[in-house]
Structures are given as structure tokens and as C-alpha cells.
Amino acid sequence: MRSMWKGSISFGLVNIPVSLYKATEDHKTSFRSLHEECKHPIQYKKWCPVCDREIQQSEVIRGYEYAPGNYVIITDDDLDELPLPTLRTIEILHFTDKENIDPIYYEKSYYLGPGEYGGKPYKLLHDAMDQTGKVAVAKVAFRTSEHLSVIRLHENCLLMNIIHYPAEVRSVQGVPGIEGIAGIEVSSTELEMATKLIQEISKNFTGDYKSNYEEALKTLIEAKVQKQEIEQPESTARMNNVIDLMEALQKSLNVAEDKRTEAPMITGRKQPVVTAPTEIESGTNVLSPTPKRRKRKVE
């Protein structure tokens, strides 16, 4: 891994040299923007309307517009000399139980590796956090901003999550319709069946999840390259038979139980994909037939 930031963790009067590494990477398929007429990639140019010419990245500087048309110039040296203790230090504010931080706050993840001569204090902090079961709430400044963060354990490594400041999290009261559900009554039988359905389709989080969208997209791209036919779900009209919630839950339970029963009987033959045949729309349930598949030739 390539370090993207170097500094230290401030743990009381102890400074722990660390390096920052990205903990995640994007595997999404990317596209180029093309001109429809000639199919050539589009170029995006930095253009100065006053000088009436294209400018290079080396000519770009940073400015803050404090009044319309008036700017104050901020250089890299200005940012490096800000009077902040967090410029080169991850300042631990306090420790807390991880359950105290709602997952809505979490944003990006970074590994913290021990820096030169930082092995022993790094291990000390790791083991102390492991023994107490605590996570650290901290601040760190990089990329032109001071970030709130959480330092926690991940296997034998310290991991830092950049998190949102509380003021950045919008109130749930702004969600349309959320207040209306307070007056909706759910029967004990419906709740019991929904709970049972959750239990039937519950299992541990695993490391083998993958994007079906990315697989389908790559299949489409390869088919277009090879000028082959691909199978595509055929669009079909929805069935009009509206069923009640209890019937939808029972049908979903039957599907889940059948799937669980058939799981140990897997042979070398490819098993069909079973999907729950219900869809909830505006408080009612509509049965949708399994879409038929048809072949189409890609261009």
C-alpha cells in the first residue's frame, strides 16, 4: 500500500507515529464520455474567459470569494501554517463505546500503520483498546479540512473512520410520510410472522458478496465486443390480483422454508434462483410474475 498521509496519534502525552492508507477501493466499471456523432472521447479543458485561452493545471491557484468578484488567495503554505494541532496529529478527544456512535455518521475508512519507532506505543494503544472494548473519537486535518473521526480495531490493525459532524446529519423528521406511520397499527399475528420471516432468512455477514450489476454490465460489454446475443429479462405487465399482508407474509415464509430445505440437496446441476414473489407498494402487496428471459443481439 502507498501511504497518503504521515503524522502521529496523540494519546495523552504519548505520540504514536503512524501512516495512513486507504482501506477500501472502488471496483465499479467506469465509462468514457464520447461525442455521439463521431464516437470520440470528449476533452474537458480549463478555460479562462478573461484571457480567452486554455490554462494548464500549474496555472491554477486557490481562491476564496469573500464578496462578489473579490477573492483572497490561499496557498499551500498558508494551509500548512494554520494554527491547528491536528495538521500533523490525530488528536484523540476521548474514548467511548462503539454502540454510542450511530452508523449514519460513518464515511471513509483508512488503515493506520505504525510509523518509524512507533511499533511499541502502537501495540500498546491497540491492546489497551482491545482490553477495554472502547473506540477513540478524534480529530485530524488533511485535504483542506479538519475531520471528525473514530479510531477502532480491525483485526490486528488500527483503523480510522472519517465520520460526519453531528450538524451534517439531517433530521429524520424531514423524511416525507415518516410521521404518518405512528398511527398505523400492526397486529400481533402480522408481527409474529414478520419476525419469523426475518429469522428464516438470517445468516452471518460473509466476505463473498459481489455486485450482480457489475457482472451483468461486464457480460453486456463482452457481448458487444464479440457481437454476441445475450439473455435479458423480458418486461412483463404486473398481475392485478392484490393480496393482503398476511397472505404475502405466508407466501414469503413458504418460499424461505422451501429454499432452506432444498439447500443441502445441491448437486452438480445448477439450481434455480428462488425469489420471494411479493412486492409491497403503498401498504398493499402485489404479486409480480417471474420475468421471462429472452435473447437479444447486441450492437
Image: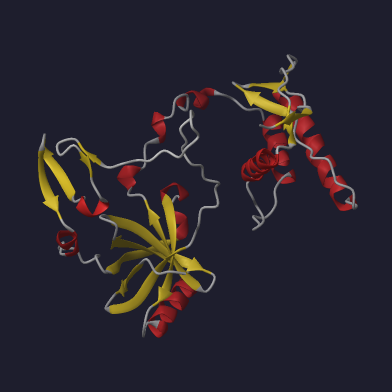
Q: Eyeballing the image, is 90 above or below 202?
A: below
Residue depicted at x 64% and y 55%: 205
Residue 291 occupies quadrant = top right
- Residue most extreme to the front: 38
The color scheme shown is secondary structure
Residue depicted at x 29% and y 75%: 12
Q: Eyeballing the image, is 244 above or below 256?
A: above
Q: As drawn, is 156 to the left or to the right of 244?
A: left
Q: As drawn, is 265 to the left or to the right of 128?
A: right
Between 167 and 62, the residue placed more toward the observer is 62
Quadrant where the C terminus is found in the figure? top right
Q: Eyeballing the image, is 243 above or below 128?
A: above
Position in image of residue 143 (x %, y %): 29, 57
Residue depicted at x 83% and y 40%: 272
Between 281 and 292, the residue placed more toward the observer is 292
Between 127 and 219, the residue placed more toward the observer is 219
Q: Eyeballing the image, is 180 above or below 77?
A: above
Residue 45 occupies quadrant = top left
Position in image of residue 24 (x %, y %): 50, 58
